[in-house]
Amino acid sequence: MSSEGFYQEFEVFSKRSDTAPLQYQFSLLAPNSELALIMAQENFMRREPVSDIWVVKRSDIRKMNCEEKQSLQRLDNKDYRNTKGYGYLKKKWRHYEQGMLDEKEILSWGEEKKRENG
């Protein structure tokens, strides 16, 4: 039996806690899913603790083809729904605050008090 037919590719995912999202970790070669899970567990025993490990045969994972990916394109122009569009607000607010209390305005407060007392 050739080595190409003996080993299969598996993708390993893990969760740090029961409520954490699943995260992709790495790929591995193993003869079957049981050994792939054991190999993944051995790898994590030397790393960080995890709550759960998922091992999936790569051939069982279905990707979108080019035509299907095109269906993900936005048909409307609603960029305002993306949060990246609000990143400028902090800079704009800082600029607004700095404009409110400029040096001339602060110095004019002292002159007004002198006039009132004088």
Image: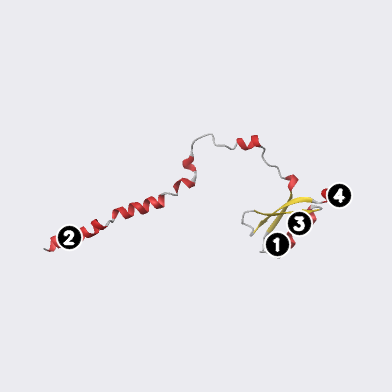
**Mark closest to the chain's N terminus, 1 or 3:** 3
**Mark closest to the chain's N terminus, 2 or 1:** 1
Estimate how packed mark 1 is, as few (under 14), some (14 to 19) or many (20 or more) residues with alpha carbons within 10 Å.
some
- Way the structure is coloured: secondary structure
Q: Which residue is mark 2?
A: 111
- In depth, the one of 89 and 107 nearer the eye is 107
Q: Which residue is mark 4?
A: 2
Q: Which residue is mark 3?
A: 37
Q: Is residue 66 above or below residue 37?
A: above
> What is the CA distance from the residue labelled 3 to the residue labelled 4?
23 Å
**Mark closest to the chain's N terminus, 2 or 4:** 4
Q: Amino acid at mark 2?
A: Glu
> What is the CA distance from the residue labelled 4 to the residue labelled 1?
29 Å
Q: Amino acid at mark 1?
A: Phe
> What is the CA distance from the residue labelled 2 to the residue labelled 4?
92 Å
The mark closer to the camera, 3 or 4, is 4
Residue, x 70% and y 57% (percent of image)? 53
